[in-house]
Image: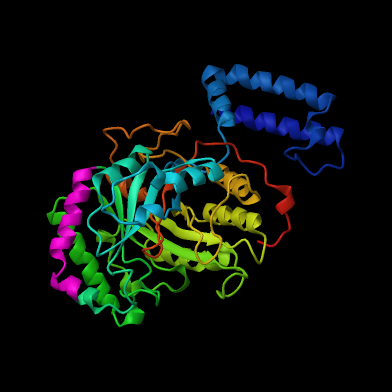
């Protein structure tokens, strides 16, 4: 009570003194330099602050100091924010032994983004064997979580492949194959992410509704595979449901009990591609993010695949807007950049205006903790090897990120930055087309 009265009296006195010295002023203004100028107000301020210190005691001083020293930014949820990128070399021949050069794309992205990946994703079709342990361990040695986009098809064959129709998965025709995968991922032991049959609402894939599959069949196939993994004891695998953001079809949503992460994908093709021209991140994702917040408010959301063409608009400003977008949607926990030059030059090049915009965006988004989602700030040093006890907590196990692409082009890792003060915006981008 004494504290409240003291603060009220101090505030009233400051207002009266300020009005006396500034008759035209309508009230106190934060940041008004007249408030700290020399004269009666400054003297009164010193007296009042001294009075507050004397009355409130040491505890209040510590409390006030802590309050004002705290960095400005979002609270605890930042512990789960991560960045990712897509890679291509790991998608080539799962049976091939791991070589250091297979991670060259990751190193290049690290230089461009100024941060290390927390998730590395690649693509694997259903003619590939389960991933080799040396591949999973090499990714984990980076301090990253392996993520695999698991595509029920043969990427070398024509689009229509009745061999892999969803009805056959439901019938159990691929149970032995799925069990082999589950056992290998369980053998690795660390957290992994499986992105089964992504972009099911897209016309390009054999598992999509455009190929004659029904949403209910997709859901049944998904749930069947999760049951196969559960029977094999692969409880360390997280499942990512990843539709294209342009036309969500919630009839294909397998259910909260079998989905750990919801991923969304979209690309700005600019003038390089006939994809509706240059589009802002808001045009690409706002509607889907709002829908997801209504339909599945408790699920972490990942921007699983995103990139912008450099042609048709201002790419650095577009990247800046992308990070502003995810700050406006706190459900987004991961942003995964599609870092493969394919239909357009999507890749981030080190020491470019785009990479500088990306670094600023990461700093402002306040990404944390590379491998363990335990809420502890990441000090900025890469992990030589993941901690032996690093396992996602039940409440946070869905916070690792996803990825995407065609089998010939892989998917992405995640990047985590230490908490940093908000970086200054690049003034050159102001007012430019995003």
Q: Nearer the viewer, residue 223 or 309?
A: 309
In the displayed structure, would residue 60 be above or below residue 387?
above
- Is residue 175 on the magenta stretch? yes
Q: Is residue 191 visible?
A: no
Residue 309 vs residue 25: left or right?
left
- Residue at horizontal 27 percent and vertical 72 percent from the top: 218
Protein image colouring: rainbow
Vertical relation: 216 (above or below) 311: below
* Residue at 53% from the left image edge and 60% from the top image edge: 307
Residue 379 belongs to the span the image colors magenta: no
- Provide the major secondary structure of the magenta segment: helix
Q: Foreground residue, 214 or 3?
A: 214
Q: Of 174 and 250, which appears nearest the observer?
A: 174
Percent x, y of residue 384: 37, 31
**Name of the residue lying farthest toward the bottom:** 212
Position of residue 139 measured from the top left corner of the image (x, y, whole percent)? 35, 43
The tally of labels here is 0
Image coordinates for residue 267, horizontal then vertical, percent: 52, 65
Evaluate whether residue 225 shows in this view: yes
When asked about the image quadrant of residue 98, the answer is top left
The residue lying at 44 percent from left, 34 percent from top is: 377
Residue bounds of the magenta highlight: 168-189
Q: Quadrant of residue 49?
A: top right
Q: Residue at x 84, y 24 (%)?
A: 38
- Quadrant including the C terminus: bottom right
- From the viewer's perspective, tell me whether residue 141 is left or right of residue 304: left
| Position of 108 relative to 384 (above/below) | below
Give the side of residue 189 with respect to residue 206, left or right: left
Which x, y percent locates residue 13?
73, 30
């Amino acid at each position: 009570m004494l504290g409240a009265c003291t603060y009220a009296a101090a505030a009233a006195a400051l207002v009266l003194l300020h009005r006396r010295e500034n008759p035209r002023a309508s009230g106190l203004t934060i940041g008004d330099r007249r408030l700290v100028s020399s004269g009666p107000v400054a003297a009164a301020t010193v007296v009042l602050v001294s009075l507050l210190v004397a009355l409130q005691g040491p505890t209040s001083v510590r409390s006030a100091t802590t309050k004002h020293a705290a960095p400005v930014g979002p609270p605890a949820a930042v512990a789960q924010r991560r960045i990712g990128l897509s890679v291509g070399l790991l998608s080539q021949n799962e049976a091939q032994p791991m070589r250091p050069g297979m991670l060259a794309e990751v190193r290049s992205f690290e230089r461009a983004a100024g941060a290390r990946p927390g998730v590395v994703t690649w693509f694997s079709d259903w003619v590939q064997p389960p991933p080799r342990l040396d591949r999973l361990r090499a990714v984990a040695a980076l301090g990253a979580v392996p993520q695999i986009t698991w595509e029920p098809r043969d990427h070398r064959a024509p689009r229509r492949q009745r061999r892999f129709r969803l009805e056959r998965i439901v019938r159990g025709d691929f149970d032995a194959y799925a069990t082999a995968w589950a056992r290998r991922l369980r053998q690795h032991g660390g957290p992994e992410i499986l992105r089964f049959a992504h972009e099911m609402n897209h016309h390009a894939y054999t598992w999509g509704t455009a190929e004659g599959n029904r949403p209910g069949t997709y859901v049944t196939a998904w749930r069947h595979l999760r049951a196969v993994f559960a029977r094999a004891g692969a409880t360390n695998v997280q499942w990512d449901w990843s539709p294209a953001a342009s036309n969500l079809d919630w009839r294909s949503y397998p259910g909260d009990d079998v989905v750990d992460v919801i991923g969304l994908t979209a690309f700005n093709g600019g003038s390089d591609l006939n994809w509706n021209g240059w589009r802002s991140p808001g045009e690409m994702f706002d509607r889907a993010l709002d829908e997801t917040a209504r339909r599945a408010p408790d699920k972490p959301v990942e921007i699983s695949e995103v990139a912008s063409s450099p042609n048709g608009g201002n790419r650095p400003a577009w990247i800046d807007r992308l990070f502003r977008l995810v700050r406006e949607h706190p459900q987004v926990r991961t942003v995964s950049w599609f870092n493969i030059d394919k239909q357009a030059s999507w890749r981030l090049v080190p020491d470019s205006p785009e990479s500088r915009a990306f670094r600023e965006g990461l700093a402002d988004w306040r990404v944390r903790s590379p491998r363990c989602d335990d809420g502890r700030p990441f000090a900025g040093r890469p992990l030589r090897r993941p901690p032996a006890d690093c396992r996602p907590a039940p409440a946070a196990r869905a916070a690792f990120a996803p990825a995407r692409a065609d089998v010939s082009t892989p998917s992405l890792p995640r990047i985590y930055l230490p908490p940093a003060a908000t970086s200054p915006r690049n003034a050159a981008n102001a007012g430019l087309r995003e």
